[in-house]
């Protein structure tokens, strides 16, 4: 569960940084066309980041479910 929480915290941090980058670009835009182009240029990077986060999230949750199933090996304390 700790890994899931850490991943989500990292994903939120990356989201905040990406939003900050978008705002910086928006402030520098000299026209609506430039603003639009700059924002559209960031879409592939955003899509790839979200896909990667989702893939990691699915693997982490699947691992947690697998570990919680009856008969799964348990860690000793």
Image: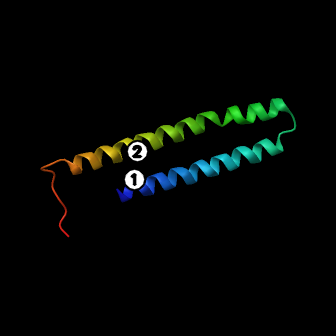
Q: How many residues crowd mark 2 within 10 Å: few (<14), some (14–19), many (20+)?
A: some
Q: Is 55 rendered above or below residue 70?
A: above
Determine the CA span between mark 2 and mark 1: 7 Å
Q: Are marks 2 and 1 in contact (CB under 8 Å)?
A: yes
Q: Quadrant of residue 45?
A: top right
Coloring scheme used = rainbow
Q: Residue at x 66, y 37 (%)?
A: 42
Point out the tag, 2 or 1, that comes first from the N-terminus. Answer: 1
Q: Residue at x 59, y 48 (%)?
A: 15
Local secondary structure at mark 2: helix
Give x and y (percent) for residue 40.
69, 31
- Of 6 and 28, nearer the camera is 6
Q: Is residue 59 left or right of residue 54?
A: left
**Image position, residue 61 (x, y; %):** 34, 46
Q: Which residue is mark 2?
A: 57
The quarter of the picture where the N terminus appears is bottom left
10 versus 53 height, above or below:
below
Callout 1 crowding tier (Cα within 10 Å): few <14, some 14–19, many ≥20: some
| Residue found farthest to the top | 33
Horizontal relation, residue 2 to residue 12: left or right: left
**Total marks placed:** 2
Residue closest to the eye, 14 or 38: 14
Q: In the image as oriented, which residue stretches furthest toward the right?
A: 30
In the rendered structure, the answer to whether residue 34 lies left or right of residue 18 reads: right
Mark 1 lies on residue: 4
Local SS, label 1: helix
Return the residue found at the far bottom: 77
Residue in the image at 83% along x and 44% along y: 28
Which mark is on residue 58? Answer: none
Assign the C terminus to one quadrant of the image. bottom left
Residue 26's x, y, as percent? 78, 42
């Amino acid at each position: 569960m700790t890994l899931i929480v850490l991943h989500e915290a990292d994903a939120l941090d990356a989201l905040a940084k990406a939003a900050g980058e978008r705002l910086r670009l928006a402030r520098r835009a000299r026209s609506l066309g430039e603003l639009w182009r700059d924002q559209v240029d960031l879409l592939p990077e955003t899509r790839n980041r979200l896909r990667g986060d989702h893939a990691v999230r699915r693997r982490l949750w699947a691992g947690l479910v697998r570990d919680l199933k009856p008969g799964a090996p348990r860690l000793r304390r």
